[in-house]
Image: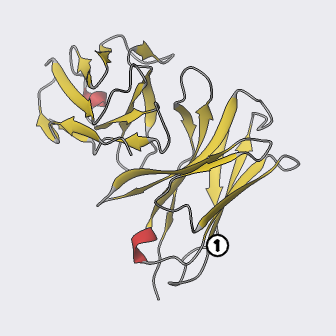
Amino acid sequence: DIQMTQSPSSLSANIGDRVTITCRASRDITNNLNWYQQKPGKAPKLLISRTSTLQSGVPSRFSAIGSGTEFALTVSSLQPEDFATYYCQQSFSVPYTFGQGTMLEI
Amino acid sequence: QLQLKESGPGPVKPSETLSLTCTVSGFSITDSKFFWDWIRQTPGSGLEWIGTISYTGITYYNPSVQSRVSMSVDISTNQFSLNLRTVTAADTAVYFCARHRAGVYRDFDFWGQGILVSVSS
């Protein structure tokens, strides 16, 4: 299985801050990396597909880059609704695997 | 409007079979651009992909559960189902069903709300 490792596990930030979450794959997954946002008691929500493609309706303050084994999600100016847990997920090969999550807190 | 909703009979005893159904509304599960998946979440293990099924019944399972799992699809009712046999406390989790885009993206673009399944005697 491909292991996905996110850092940091948790992150404290303020409204308006720029934050970056990183995700590392245990082997080359080219650009087959997706990002999800999850709020308490809710299902994960797809934010970004295939490394950098923003889903419809996702604010442009979200962006992501990467390839191979190193990926990053950036929120350029945190808004109150952005405080949540973020997960990366590789879609390169089955079994699909997720990172352990990064909890973004105020 | 696409919606997915998980349903099931409630708590399960150890060694019994966990059975869940996902009802898809607002979209046909026979669209060949999509697969239909089960994913579970536990506080300790995070998000774990269980498996996927196409409307034609093609399946791929996570090796971690492959010996105990089966999935099926019912196109007449626009539902797909999960059976997980011989459960233990480690199978206690929130189970999500999700739509899985095939092809280039292979992401989970729509999810059900999730259903908590407890395994307890």
Q: Who is closer to the viewer here, B85 or A21?
A: B85
Give the residue drawn at x 40%, y 71%.
Answer: B90
Instruction: Please identify the quarter of the rendering in which residue A89 is found.
Output: top left
Report the chain holding disc 1.
B
At a point 21% along the width and 21% down the height, the residue shown is A78
Depth check: give the residue in front, A23 or A73: A23
State left or right for residue B27 relative to residue B19.
right
Q: Is residue B43 visible?
A: yes
Which image quadrant: the N terminus of chain B? Answer: top right
A39 left or right, relative to B52: left
The residue most toward the bottom is B121
Where residue A14 appears, as percent x and y from the top left, is 12, 26
Relative to B78, B6 lies left or right: left
Q: From what the image shows, is residue A52 above or below residue B29?
A: above
Tell me which colouring the rendered structure shows.
Answer: secondary structure
Picture residue at 51% right of the left edge, 62% below the top = B65
Q: Does residue B15 lie above or below A73 as drawn?
A: below
The residue lying furthest to the front in this view is A27
* Residue situated in front as seen by the camera: A94 or B116: A94
Residue under label 1, please give it: B9
Image coordinates for residue B21, horizontal then vertical, percent: 68, 58
> x%, y% of residue B67?
57, 67
- Density class for disc 1 (Cα within 10 Å; few <14, some 14-19, many ≥20) is few
Amino acid found under the numbered disc labelled 1: Pro
Residue placed most toward the observer, B111 or A29: A29
Q: Quadrant of residue A61?
A: top left
